[in-house]
Image (spheres, rainbow, N blue to C red):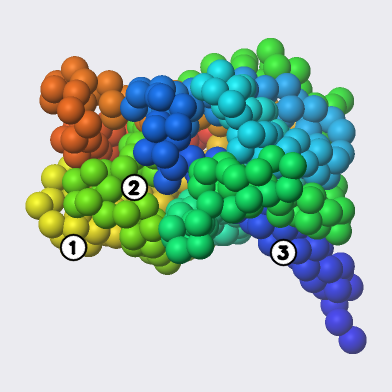
């Protein structure tokens, strides 16, 4: 006979793992829909008559405006109502808006459609973070978050591979002719293809069993004012977590937005060639790095290192500094891709740790709201600045000729050093915060 409660715990873990798998698929889809534009920079510029800065705003600000701001009311809602319904509705909405990107007739229409993608995707992570923090014990949360955040590397890699495959298909077979709308340029077809799986993924969410909200002993979810008050009381902890993630986010979003263009412009690669190389690196080394960061934090936590979820990002930021500064300046594509592969492995280890740190430093009654506030900072600053700052620095300091390697190098060096300093400043405060919450 089993020990009473063991079968229930096994069932809970099974449901938690099922939900984690579904959320991973949803997050992969969200990053494919989000990042597919990065491979289509040149044809979109040509067809719509855009500048590098305008494309940078499409990749960053257009998406981040609603993704960041609307995430807060959605997070507050997820602390109160069914997280399953919020996630499913968001998937359907962002998939429809991704399809609309393919039909955009000008810059304004494409900008608005990208805002819609951001609005829909704002539903996923705050709700999923809250769900997972209730489904897994605290010591295992960094691993669960690392697995969830494989969506970044797998989704980013698939966005490149799918986009590259579409480019190569059109180059071989010509531009497809669709019923009613007729012939469509390559980049428009790519948006339509990546929008289609949204219906299936939204249906998968219905199979996830939502867990009870862990440790809610108070009267109910916190108000936004109470949540902000908690952040203020533990200001040093949250400044360290936010500062580390925002700095690394600026660099990371710059990488995903501009490295395909860097390879195309500097080494005369085709879009398909650049996407194959970068996509495989994201898929393999990015995913391994994300898992390694989460496992490292978990092992340190189980050994009693209370600040592991902030200490690991600090170490990774320092290790990233040299490859981040040197990779975009390499004189050959082989050297560039080797350093980029190392950077991708190291860099992607931080985000699962940061998300676990936010959840563990946040009371259970405000976890979705806390996740939304974190994503507000990471997206509004990291995503908006990371995609737009590359052409801005190129224009301000390197002549604005579109050779964006030096700008990427400057951003990489500064971002990693700032992130390391920010993390180091909050190690003791973070440990004290999670100890205080454990006593409450």
Point 63% across, 50% down: residue:
177
Q: Nearer the viewer, residue 313 or 164?
A: 164
Answer with mark 2 or mark 1, whichever residue precedes in sequence. Answer: 2
| Residue at the outermost top position | 225
Q: Which mark is residue 318?
A: none
Give how far apart the Cα atoms at labels 3 and 1 are: 39 Å
Q: Is residue 264 visible?
A: yes
Q: Are marks 3 and 1 in contact (CB under 8 Å)?
A: no
In contact (CB < 8 Å): disc 2 and disc 3: no
Q: Is residue 289 visible?
A: no
Q: Of 410 and 106, which appears nearest the observer?
A: 106
- Where residue 414 appears, as percent x and y from the top left, is 22, 32
Give me the disc on residue 334: 1
Residue at position x 61%, y 38% in the image: 102
CA gap, disc 2 and disc 3: 34 Å
The secondary element bearing badge 2 is classed as helix
Q: Which residue is identified by label 2?
A: 260
- Residue 240, horizontal then vertical, whole percent: 41, 30
Considering only vertical position in the picture, is 122 above or below 17?
A: above
Q: CA distance from mark 2 to mark 1?
A: 14 Å
Mark 1: few/some/many CA within 10 Å (<14, 14-19, 20+): few
Q: Quadrant of the N terminus?
A: bottom right
Residue marked by disc 3 = 17
Quarter where residue 409 is shown: top left
Q: Residue furthest left?
A: 331
Q: Secondary structure at mark 1?
A: helix
Q: Residues within 10 Å of mark 3 (few under 14, many from 20)?
A: some
Q: Is residue 376 above or below residue 18?
A: above
Point 53% across, 52% down: residue: 175
| Quarter-of-image position of residue 362 | top right
């Amino acid at each position: 006979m089993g020990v009473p409660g063991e079968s229930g715990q096994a069932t809970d873990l099974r449901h938690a793992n099922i939900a984690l798998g579904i959320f991973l698929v949803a997050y992969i889809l969200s990053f494919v829909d989000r990042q597919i534009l990065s491979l289509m920079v040149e044809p979109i510029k040509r067809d719509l008559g855009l500048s590098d800065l305008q494309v940078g705003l499409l990749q960053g600000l257009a998406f981040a405006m609603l993704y960041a701001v609307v995430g807060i009311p959605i997070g507050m809602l997820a602390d109160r109502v069914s997280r399953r319904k919020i996630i499913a509705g968001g998937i359907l909405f962002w998939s429809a808006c991704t399809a609309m990107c393919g039909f955009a007739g000008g810059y304004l229409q494409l900008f608005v459609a990208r805002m819609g993608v951001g609005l829909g995707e704002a539903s996923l992570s705050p709700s999923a973070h809250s769900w997972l923090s209730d489904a897994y014990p605290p010591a295992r949360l960094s691993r669960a978050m690392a697995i969830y955040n494989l969506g970044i590397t797998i989704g980013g890699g698939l966005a490149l591979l799918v986009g590259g495959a579409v480019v190569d298909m059109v180059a071989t077979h010509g531009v497809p002719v669709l019923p009613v709308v007729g012939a469509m340029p390559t980049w428009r077809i790519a948006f339509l293809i990546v929008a289609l799986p949204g219906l299936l993924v939204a249906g998968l969410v219905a199979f996830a069993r939502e867990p009870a909200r862990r440790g809610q002993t108070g009267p109910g979810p916190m108000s936004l004012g109470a949540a902000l008050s908690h952040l203020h009381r533990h200001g040093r902890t949250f400044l360290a977590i936010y500062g580390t993630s925002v700095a690394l986010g600026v660099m990371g979003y710059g990488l995903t937005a501009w490295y395909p263009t860097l390879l195309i412009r500097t080494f005369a690669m085709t879009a398909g060639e650049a996407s194959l190389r970068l996509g495989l690196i994201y898929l393999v080394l990015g995913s391994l790095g994300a898992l390694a960061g989460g496992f490292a934090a978990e092992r340190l936590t189980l050994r009693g290192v209370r600040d592991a979820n902030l200490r690991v990002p600090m170490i990774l930021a320092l290790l990233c500094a040299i490859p981040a500064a040197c990779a975009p300046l390499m004189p050959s594509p082989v050297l560039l891709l080797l350093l980029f592969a190392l950077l991708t492995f190291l860099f992607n280890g931080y985000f699962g740790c940061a998300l676990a740190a936010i959840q563990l430093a946040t009371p259970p009654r405000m976890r979705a709201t806390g996740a939304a506030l974190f994503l507000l900072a990471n997206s509004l600053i990291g995503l908006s600045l990371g995609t737009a700052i590359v052409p801005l620095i190129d224009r301000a300091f390197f002549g604005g000729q579109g050779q964006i390697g030096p700008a990427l190098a400057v951003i990489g060096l500064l971002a990693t050093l700032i992130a390391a300093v920010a993390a180091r400043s909050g190690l003791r405060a973070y440990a004290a915060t999670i100890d205080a919450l454990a006593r409450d």
